[in-house]
Image (cartoon, rainbow, N blue to C red):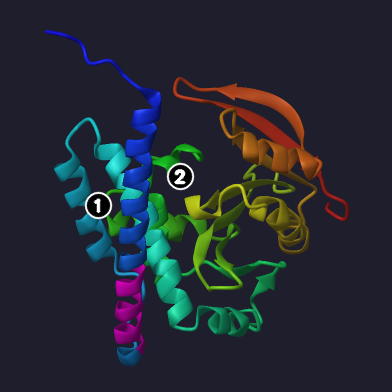
Amino acid sequence: MEEKELNLEEIRKDIDAVNKEMLRLLIKRLQLCSDVAEYKKARGLPIYVPEREQAILGWAESTAGPGFAPYARRFFEQVMQLGRDYESGVMGGAESGAIIATRPDAVSTERIILLPLEKSDLGPVYAMTSNEVLMEGVHITPHQSEEEAAAFIAAETKAPNLAYKLVLRGTAQFAGMLSLKPDPDQPEKVLISVVLMESCWNQGYLTELLPAAEKLAREKLSAGSIWAYIPDTNLYASRAFFKAGYMVSSVLSLPEMSFQVCCKTLDGGQ
């Protein structure tokens, strides 16, 4: 059988044609999301419906087949995140963000609002903790049910731990989570963990968030130092922490992944 000769330019033309069709369909989908947002707004319904999204992800994986299933899942996770962002704008997300920022328990940076994590945040937290890519960075097995996510919230918020959901000021979109945990044997040492949704990667949010997190650690936990475990593969996080003054203390090597153990001494701590 004669092998087909590959032509890069022809392949790229085919890709460009697919890109045009994907863009057309994305715009059409967002227009439909606008209709959904108007419907939900009129009836006071939430933007995030976890059972609907999980059904779509399950369909995408099973339809794509073994070779493409993980890519299909990630693709639709991003598409649905874009849909939630668009719906949030239609439903007045920016206005909601401004209102949220006035809460007495809110901590704000230029673009992010930090709010104490609560049981009612189960929906977006489960969307985060069920994401294999996001959980790999913090070495947590992805959750398979909302019950697991609820137990996770309970553990993260158990005193003296502090846990915050991250919300974008402009759209009130759920952007991730911050946790601060004192070392049981040395409470003045606090472990920081940050998970950002993929739509928020590489946009400077982590750099913006770290000073606020350190302030919380000092004021609420009397932290003398703050520690982070950063995967070797996460160059963006490494740059953000190093820029903020963190130094590598050691390297933790696990069978699946290696972490840089970074620390920073905090002024005003114990």
In the image, taking residue 215 as reference, residue 53 lies left or right, namely left
Q: Viewer-proximal residue, 243 or 162?
A: 243
* Magenta highlight: main SS: helix
Q: Percent from the top left, x then y, of residue 68?
A: 25, 35
Say the numbered circle drawn on residue 57: 1
Q: Which of label 1 and label 2 is nearer to you?
A: 1
Q: Percent from the top left, x then y, of residue 190?
A: 68, 47
Q: Magenta stretch containing residue 40, yes or no? A: yes
Residue linked to disc 2: 134
Say if residue 169 shows up in the picture: yes
Label 1 element class = helix
Q: Quadrant of residue 47?
A: bottom left
Label 2 Cα crowd, 10 Å radius (few <14 / some 14-19 / many 20+) = some
Say if residue 126 shows up in the picture: no
Q: Is residue 17 above or below residue 89?
A: above
Label 2 element class = helix
Residue bounds of the magenta highlight = 30-41
In the image, taking residue 129 as reference, residue 106 lies left or right, namely right
Which amino acid, mark 2?
A: Leu
Q: Is residue 168 above or below residue 234?
A: below
Residue at 19%, 32% in the rendered image: 66
